[in-house]
Image (cartoon, rainbow, N blue to C red):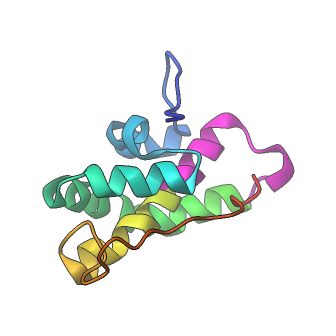
Amino acid sequence: MTTPTTTGPLLPAGFADLEPFAARWALATEAERYAERLSSSMPDMQAFYDAAFPRLEAALAHCDALDITALPEDAKHLMHLMFSLVNVSFPVEAWKQPNVPESGAASMDLVHEPML
């Protein structure tokens, strides 16, 4: 798993309130985000969702103001965190469970990651 590593904050200064979720959810690949979702409890995902969803527009505005081809590491972490928010949104909002209901052994494989 490519969990971000640093001795300081992972996220931009204006997002310190999301810092408690960054090490766990600011994951660089879809496979890692999906695996984290599947291994997480609903209370954990709900806490992340409740903290991050109200900050989504601010996070997008922050990243949109930067050059996507030269994002600083803290902005990349913020974007990865928001990708994880998308990944937990259906379990939290609709399914009330980490897995896709009635999907059996189905899996999801992302062929290409978003370019950052």
Q: In the image, 70: left or right of 111?
A: right
Figure disc tally: 0
Q: In the image, 75: left or right of 13?
A: right
Q: Foreground residue, 69 or 113?
A: 113
In the rendered view, would you say 95 is above or below 12?
below
In the rendered view, would you say 69 is above or below 82?
above
Q: In the image, 18: left or right of 113?
A: left
| Residue with the most extreme front position | 105
Identify the residue at image location x=48%, y=27%: 9
**Observer able to see residue 67:** no
Q: Residue 86: image x %, image y %?
A: 45, 68
Which of the 4 image quadrants contains residue 76? top right
Q: Foreground residue, 4 or 66?
A: 4
Q: Is residue 12 magenta?
A: no
Which of the 4 image quadrants contains residue 37? bottom left
| Residue with the most extreme left position | 43
Q: In the image, 70: left or right of 103?
A: right
The segment highlighted magenta reads: 65-81
**Observer able to see residue 70:** yes
Q: Residue 41: image x %, image y %?
A: 17, 54
Identify the residue at image location x=57%, y=43%: 77
Q: Is residue 66 magenta?
A: yes
Q: Foreground residue, 54 or 82?
A: 82
Identify the residue at image location x=30%, y=57%: 38
Q: Residue 51: image x %, image y %?
A: 30, 57
Q: Residue 105: image x %, image y %?
A: 34, 70
Q: Foreground residue, 25 or 113?
A: 113
| Residue with the most extreme top position | 7
Identify the residue at image location x=50%, y=69%: 108
Q: How would you classify the magenta stretch by its main secondary structure?
A: helix
